[in-house]
Image (tube, rainbow, N blue to C red):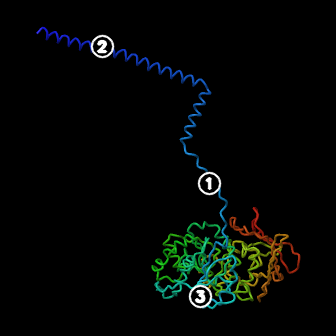
Amino acid sequence: MKSNRKVEENFLWDQIMKKHFSIAWTFPKLVVSSVLLISIICIFYNLSFSNASNPSNHRSNIINTLHVVDQAMPPPVSSPPKLGPPEKTTLHHLVFGIAASARLWEHRKNYIKLWWKSQEMRGTVWLDKAVANRSDDHLLPPVKISCDTSKFKYKNLKGHRSAIRISRIVSETLRLGFEDVRWFVMGDDDTYFVPENLVRVLSKYDHNQLYYIGSLSESHLQNIHFSYGMAYGGGGFAISYPLAKALAKMQDRCIQRYPGLYGSDDRIHACMAELGIPLTKEPGFHQYDVYGSLLGLLSAHPVAPLISIHHLDVVEPIFPNVNRVQALQRLRVPIKLDSAAIMQQSVCYDKTRSWTISVSWGYTVQIYRGIFSVREMEMPARTFLNWYKRADYSGFSFNTRPVARHACQKPFVFYLSNALYNKNTNQTASEYVQDRLPSSECKWNMANPSRIERVQVYKKPDPHLWDKAPRRNCCRVLPRKKKGTMAIDVRVCGEDDVIELQ
């Protein structure tokens, strides 16, 4: 028992001693570790303080830091090279689709030859059937036969189903695969275009966008019957290339939805409506749904480039005593000299003789007894009837004024006879000769314009006229140098120019 108790006492003693020594050893170890940690912190603090006090070391650290950041950041993206101004729209960028019929082709092709430039222009005449080849074909656009349209429904009792064929001309022209096209231009075989002005107008628009550009009818009733939002194809309209592509994709389906429409223009308009494209109106496209003389309309042309004249077989020749083709040929000279200014109206006064003078450059000069406001002179005189052959001033979609009946109030009209360019003075000189018509004698006690035989108009060409905000040109009567001749200077209006009555 004693021996066992001894063994137990020894065991307990050993356990107590081990625990004691373990505690005794752990405490000094903890103290030593704490001292070492504090010493290390102090050393790093002293080093940091030393570096901070040394500017060269500080800059070195910053540089090293920036170098590391620079390596981590992606290299800067170089800006793309600056592109030059976009290429200007030219005749080359336009492709014409001209609607024609075999029955009238031999006659109406003479209108096209007046404005078509084979070396500069591209396009196609679309006929309903083949015609014989002629020696003058090289002066005209190539001729093609329209596709068969018999599968399309046509239910309008007053129209003709050729409207379906004509409505597809833009799409058919697109499928010919012309390259570098910006605009497709639609017109008829009895339409006269001024191509230079067409380019000027289309250059204002982004051809990469969807544009449908044209104008309305002169007939209020026509616009009500068809639409005030529709381009009339005889006067011509232009469709941008992206829009032509969009139209070609859906047009055949679209046409099938409108079998009751009358013509080609309203079918195009219906498809444009489905595409969500409104008409962009340019007043230089002229449908001319009128009968009679265009004198009143052309001598008071809007302040906009003249682009087209339609219905040449319906209206009278624009110059007297010649046929229609000869009349249009006379415009070629002034158009070549200053196409931007053709038909542009200027109004001025001969105050010593109390005359009002209206110049339609390249076309006419008119002299009126008395002083009339510009507001009155810029309204076309009704030398024409509306499309329904009625002398009804309310039948037009614009303001007009009556033709004077009193002998003393009728204008004296001088028509263009010739024009030339003087390169030394950079000036055009155009001459206008009086069209003498029988009339009653005027008994007013004032100067008589009948004594003027010819009018000479001097003007500097201005190809950039339409690059600026629209403004009518100014004119002034020059001192008389020759009996029976009046001289007029037409120019761009200055900042302070005002056309005042007094």
Crowd band around label 2 with a 10 angstrom C-alpha radius: few (<14), some (14–19), many (20+): few
Q: Nearer the viewer, residue 73 or 26?
A: 26
Q: Is residue 338 at least partly visible in the picture?
A: yes
**Residue type beneath disc 3:** Ser
Tag 2 residue:
21
Q: Quadrant of the C terminus?
A: bottom right
* CA distance for labels 3 and 1: 52 Å
The residue lying at 67 percent from left, 90 percent from top is 134
Closer to us: 16 or 60: 16
Q: Amino acid at mark 1?
A: Pro
Residue 448: quarter of image? bottom right
The kind of residue tagged 2 is Phe
| Residue at x 58% of width, y 32% of height | 62
State the separation of the CA atoms marked 2 and 3. Answer: 124 Å
Q: Position of residue 252 (x, y in %)?
A: 48, 78
Q: Position of residue 371 (x, y in %)?
A: 76, 74
The image shows residue 340, relative to residue 167, as above or below, that is: above
- Label 1 environment density (alpha carbons within 10 Å; few <14, some 14–19, many ≥20): few
Q: Is residue 63 above or below residue 304?
A: above
For the view shown, which residue lies furthest in the top direction? 2
The answer to whether residue 4 is left or right of residue 286 is: left
For disc 1, the marked residue is: 80
Using residue 379 as the reference point, say whether residue 5 is left or right of it: left
Q: Is residue 368 visible?
A: no
| Nearest to viewer (mark 2 / mark 3) | 2
Q: Which residue is mark 3?
A: 101
Q: Secondary structure at mark 2?
A: helix
